[in-house]
Image: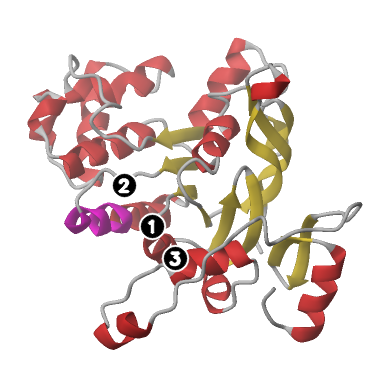
């Protein structure tokens, strides 16, 4: 495994100070992201995966826990200069390509916003050339620079969002459900673009989504979230071949395949957390069952999984 780029330790993000109405959107999760990899983060709507991404990039201040980027504490006290430097290295591609672009700004100014903030262009000519290069990098043309967002399709707008994120030459990009608002025919194009850019620029991704098939396609490893908890983390192929947590099994059993015979006989597994109970005093934690395959379980379940090489 390559060098760690990001280390998330016991991260918590709670909303509402009133304990009676407290929402534990991210509840004590720990994982690492390595340089050059794509870590997929999946789960149903409301499980906390987008909040995790926004907390990592410091759009939200963490309730507790640490996030280390290249060994530096993201949520520690920082000067404006340090924050500016950090913001250049970590960027985000947002879910909604319609809402994430200012409708009153031309594409030239939208993409160049980060260039201007960080003073990356020598002059106006250099600024224009940088924007034109970025447009061509994401499969658009320099003629698009003088248009407004409403003149583009959904897929093109997401390409603009990617160009904007790339403008400051980041190391790490959080892609927060970047294809969920797009037509199925366009989704593969955007994901293929992200993969090409990763190879060209050595980028590292946190790819957040609920489409398990697409996550498997782009991810090296996959983390599964359920109600603010990380319940399983494994290499992508391993997770699909041998899901260990019952919630992961439930998610995978819901994936349809273009095979009528399979679909007629497909048995969908349901996950009822009330059935998956623990005894009083049992410590539930992420445990490494096989190399690189972690499951949120008790010591009793852990021993059973190791011995039987089976599911819960």
Q: Residue at x 42, y 67 (%)?
A: 254
* Mark 3 / mark 2, whichever is N-terminal: 2
Looking at the image, which is closer to me, 87 or 285?
Answer: 285
| Residue with the mark numbered 2 | 180
Question: x and y percent of residue 161 in the render?
Answer: 30, 35
Between the C-alphas of marks 1 and 2, the distance is: 8 Å
How packed mark 3 is, by other alpha carbons closer than 10 Å (few <14, some 14-19, many 20 or more), is some
Quadrant where the N terminus sits is bottom right
Q: Please tell me whether mark 2 sits on a helix, a strand or a loop.
A: loop
Q: Is residue 171 visible?
A: no
Q: What residue is shown with label 3? A: 216
Q: Which mark is residue 211?
A: 1
Look at the image and tell me in which quarter the C terminus lies.
bottom right
User: Which sits in the foreground, 46 or 81?
Assistant: 46
Magenta highlight: main SS: helix
Q: Which residues are magenta?
A: 184-192
Q: Is residue 52 magenta?
A: no
Dot 1 or dot 3: first in sequence order is 1
Determine whether label 1 and label 2 are within 8 Å by CB.
yes
Instruction: Identify the element where label 1 is drawn.
Output: loop
Q: Is residue 165 left or right of residue 239?
A: left
> What is the number of callouts on the image?
3
User: Viewer-nearest of labels 1 and 3?
Assistant: 1
- Judging depth in this view, the residue of 119 and 225 nearest the camera is 225
The dot on residue 298 is none
Position of residue 136 relative to residue 280, above or below, is above
Q: Residue extending furthest top?
A: 80
């Amino acid at each position: 495994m390559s060098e760690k780029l990001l280390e998330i330790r016991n991260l918590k993000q709670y909303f509402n100070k009133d304990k009676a109405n407290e929402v534990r959107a991210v509840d004590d999760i720990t994982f690492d992201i390595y340089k050059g990899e794509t870590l997929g983060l999946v789960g149903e709507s409301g499980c906390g995966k987008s909040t995790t991404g926004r907390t990592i990039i410091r759009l939200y201040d963490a309730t507790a826990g640490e996030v280390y980027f290249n060994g530096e504490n993201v949520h520690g006290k920082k000067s404006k200069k340090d924050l500016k430097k950090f913001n250049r290295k970590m960027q985000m591609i947002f879910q909604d390509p319609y809402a994430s672009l200012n409708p009153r700004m031309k594409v030239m100014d939208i993409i160049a916003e980060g260039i201007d903030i960080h003073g990356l262009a020598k002059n106006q000519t250099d600024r224009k050339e940088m924007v034109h290069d970025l447009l061509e990098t994401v499969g658009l043309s320099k003629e698009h620079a003088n248009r407004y967002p409403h003149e583009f399709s959904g897929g093109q707008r997401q390409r603009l969002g990617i160009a904007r994120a790339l403008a400051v030459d980041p190391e790490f990009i959080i892609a927060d459900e970047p294809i969920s608002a797009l037509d199925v025919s366009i989704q593969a194009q955007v994901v293929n673009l992200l993969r090409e850019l990763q190879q060209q620029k050595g980028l590292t991704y946190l790819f957040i989504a609920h489409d398990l098939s697409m996550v498997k396609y782009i991810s090296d490893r996959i983390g599964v979230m359920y109600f603010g908890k990380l319940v399983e983390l494994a290499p992508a192929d391993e997770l699909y071949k041998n899901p260990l947590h019952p919630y992961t099994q439930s998610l995978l059993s819901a994936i349809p395949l273009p095979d009528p015979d399979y679909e007629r006989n497909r048995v969908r597994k349901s996950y009822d957390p009330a059935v998956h109970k623990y005894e009083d005093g049992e410590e539930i934690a992420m445990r490494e069952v096989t190399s690189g395959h972690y499951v949120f379980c008790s010591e009793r379940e852990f021993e059973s999984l190791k011995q039987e090489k089976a599911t819960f």
